[in-house]
Image (cartoon, helix red, strand yellow):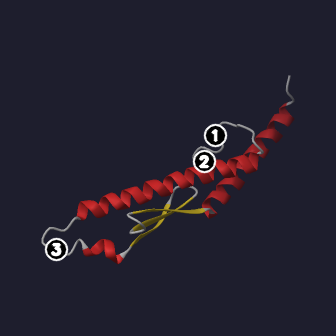
Amino acid sequence: MMNPLKMAEMLSQANQLKEEMNHKLEQTVVEGSSGGGAVTATLNGKKQLLKIRIDPSAVVSLSGAQPDVEMLEDLVVAAVNEAGRRADDAIQANAKNLLGGLNIPGFGSGLE
């Protein structure tokens, strides 16, 4: 039978690891772009959108009789999705580094 004090210590260590990982993810910054760099999205490792940059050349197509707003919207979505994939990669890398390859449920898959 497991010692309850040992279990409490293990839970405390797990919570400490999770807090450390969350802190690292908040400080991790990733970018994704689309349209050859026309739109760039910046996210942190917790997948919070920090910034959207739209190159002025992408806005030029909006200044006609038939502005292509849908194209710009698609570029924004694609850039955010690409940044999200890179954030997922950063989450997995941080989890592996922090846990030394251990596969513990709740770590490395969208910590909150």
Neighbour class for label 2 at 10 Å: few (<14), some, many (≥20)?
Answer: some
- Residue at left offset 35%, top offset 61%: 75
- Helix, strand or loop under label 1: loop
Classify residue 15 as left or right of residue 55: right
Mark pair 3, 1: CA separation? 50 Å
Residue under label 2, please give it. 111
- Residue at left offset 83%, top offset 32%: 4
Name the N-terminal-most of marks 2 and 1: 1
- Helix, strand or loop under label 2: loop
Residue under label 1, please give it. 106
Which amino acid, by three-letter code, is at mark 3? Gly
Mark pair 3, 2: CA separation? 44 Å
Name the N-terminal-most of marks 3 and 2: 3
Q: Residue furthest left?
A: 65
- Residue at left offset 63%, top offset 57%: 25
Residue 5 drawn above or below residue 46:
above
Name the N-terminal-most of marks 3 and 1: 3
* Front tag of 3 and 2: 3
Q: Nearer the viewer, residue 44 or 62?
A: 62
Instruction: State if disc 1 and disc 2 touch (CB < 8 Å).
Output: yes
